[in-house]
Image (spheres, coloured by chain):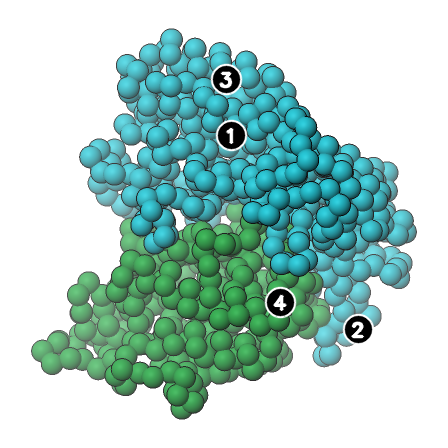
Chain colours: A cyan, B green
Amino acid sequence: MAPSLIQNPDAGLLRFITCGSVDDGKSTLIGRLLLDSKAILADALDTLERTSLKRGARGMDLSLLTDGLQAEREQGITIDVAYRYFATGRRKFILGDAPGHEQYTRNMVTAASTADLAIILVDARKGVLTQTRRHTAIAHLLGIRHLVMAINKMDLVDWSEDVFAAHRRDGLAFAGELGIPHLHFIPISALEGDGVVERGGRMPWYQGPTLMELLETVPLAEADLERPFRFPVQWVCRPRPGAPRAFRDFRGYGGRVASGAIQVGDRIAVLPGQLQSRVRGIRLGEDRLEAAQAGQSVTLELEDELDVARGDLLADPRRPPALSRDLEATLCWFAETPARAGARFLLHLGTREVRALLQELRSRLEITTLKPQAADQLAMNDLAEVRFRLQAPAAADPYADNRATGAFIVIDETTNATVAGGLIRSL
Amino acid sequence: MILHSRTLTHLDALEAEGIHILREVAGQCRNPVLLFSGGKDSVCLLALAEKAFRPGAFPFPLLHIDTGHNFPEVIAFRDRRARELGERLIVRTVEDSIRRGTVVLRTPLQSRNPFQSVTLLEAIQEFGFDACIGGARRDEEKARAKERIFSFRDEFGQWDPRHQRPELWDLYNARCFPQENLRVFPISNWTELDVWQYIQREALDLPGIYYVHTRSVVRRGAALVPVTEFTPARDGERVERLRVRFRTVGDIPCTAPVESAAAGIEDIIRETATAELTERGATRLDDQVSEAAMEQRKKEGYF
């Protein structure tokens, strides 16, 4: 048995999304990834009959691997984000599949919010379209670190290097306009398999990684570790009756490290109260840890007895978050009822719940360019620049600096619906 | 400061996400409950709850909806785990719903799995639970692949796939009006292989029937059916003694074992990794009735 998958520490968990419509061959690409990764797994495990899987999908409808709900099958459309899971010998993958039809922005924003990588599909016969620009703009806005433009259907343009180069030029040009620093380009044929998992022999002019090689090797969370320590408190832990003697006076704060890292002895600030203390202990359940980093759920004990509660943010006092009652943000509006200035909402910012007044609707963003336009209300799937006035100060960071502490959701308390997602621009 | 900087393994990442979700339930919900059947997925939930809340008590009781057709070793395991943890276990039975007349069986030995929904809704009503934490995974079935981690149910316990709350980042909206409730799935993003790898890594105890044992079975279609008082052999069927294990455990009339040569958990992980059949395709008899069976059941209030 190949030990890589089963026993060794692996290359982690990559969350990614695919953007594009059925016409771009998205379902076929997803089917190809699911099918060929099984073949990779079979290679790694060396037990399955490889030939039955590998390159075996010619003549089979790969898109059938991704069909969804009854309601969708009846209508022949995909209405919601679906999640798929697969693994190779090196990494586990969670694929968020956002459909390309109605409510597109809402679905894509939802899928993109947790993704580390986005594959933007381009039909090699059509090149960069308005839809391509829209997908790329949203992926960039949501702070997805790795953007990959997959030029698909290369089989239909005779595997032409010139066609690929032309689309690449177009893609780079508008990526520059959007301020995207880096974009990967990979020529593929999801149908034939070339460039996805297998390199194939028909594009010798392309020397870069295959799509799967890129998925398996892009760095994951390093950027989150360099950011300042942030820890939204979810839960205050007090000992249960009958807990071991050592825990009789235990008081711990449960949460997930949103960014940065922490070790025993580090100073921390408690916000919004602006108290300070030191970390006395870090625990996972009752076990002790010496340190914890972005992504880990732990329980922190502090040196001092402070009044810390759910909704507080523990942070690096040398690089503290901003504390403010005014919030400038980019909003993606999800609800069928339009949003107008003057409306009141409940915001979830990390673990903090705070009432807010939508004070000003500055502009609507044109979705393909992210350029502002005048607007007096927001309709479903609109992106907009807005200003909120909060009932109480909240500690947060700009989304561009910190995805974990710069995001919020907007809840309409009269319906309890989640009506918008927000990205903090400044506060 | 960066110490021991590393990429979290996929199990670390999934575990951290599960703990975070459990704490959000505890922080946001008034009266949650954790559904514990003794099965491997809910065993993982308990392990996550210990990491999330110890040295404190769990901020929710455990609830099992018992069909009355469960394997006795699973029920014994369920009771022992609850005792070891010192947490409160509530058991409500489909039998009670039958007595009340809210469940009517067509035949005495039919699968009681679909009727768990009725008994669950009655338990939710009885205790006023506003959130039920369950061990369902998105890789189990197509309908689940689109379900939210915090999945909203209306006052009839129904799931409406067309009107799900958008779920962004790790920010969850657990707000409900009275009579409505949530189903919350902390291991949504785990696969069957992840579950087995986690059980191995954490050395979690499981009911013995997950491991290979010799059992009397009959072959019915593509599936093996265990021979029990609830699932007797039919006329003309040949009872065989085979080496089998269960990949899921639940109501006996709808749970099929698979033939296996796995000597221990490492072999099970190996078999799982190479399994071509999805878990439910191989072992759940009731979902095969129709492709949309799960979606239909979810709309009716099933987990």
- Relative to A160, B30 lies left or right: right
Mark 2: few/some/many CA within 10 Å (<14, 14-19, 20+): some
For disc 4, the marked residue is B177
For disc 1, the marked residue is A135
The amino acid type of the residue labelled 4 equals Phe
Residue drawn 54% across the image and 21% down it: A183
The amino acid type of the residue labelled 1 equals His
Residue drawn 16% across the image and 77% down it: B239
For disc 3, the marked residue is A171
The numbered mark at residue A248 is 2
Camera-near label (2 vs 4) is 4
- Outermost residue, left side: B236
Nearer-N-terminus badge (2/3): 3
| Residue A297 position within the rendered picture, expressed as x and y whole percent measured from the top left | 66, 53
> Marks 2 and 3: same chain?
yes
Q: Classify residue B178 by image quadrant.
A: bottom right
Tag 2 near tag 3, CB within 8 Å: no
Q: Secondary structure at mark 4?
A: loop
Q: Secondary structure at mark 1?
A: helix
Residue drawn 44% across the image and 15% down it: A167
> Marks 4 and 1: same chain?
no
Give me the chain letter of mark 4. Answer: B
Mark 1: few/some/many CA within 10 Å (<14, 14-19, 20+): many
Front position in the image: A36 or B68: B68
Nearer-N-terminus badge (2/1): 1
Q: Mark 4 and mark 3: span between their CA atoms?
A: 47 Å
- Relative to A289, B181 lies left or right: left
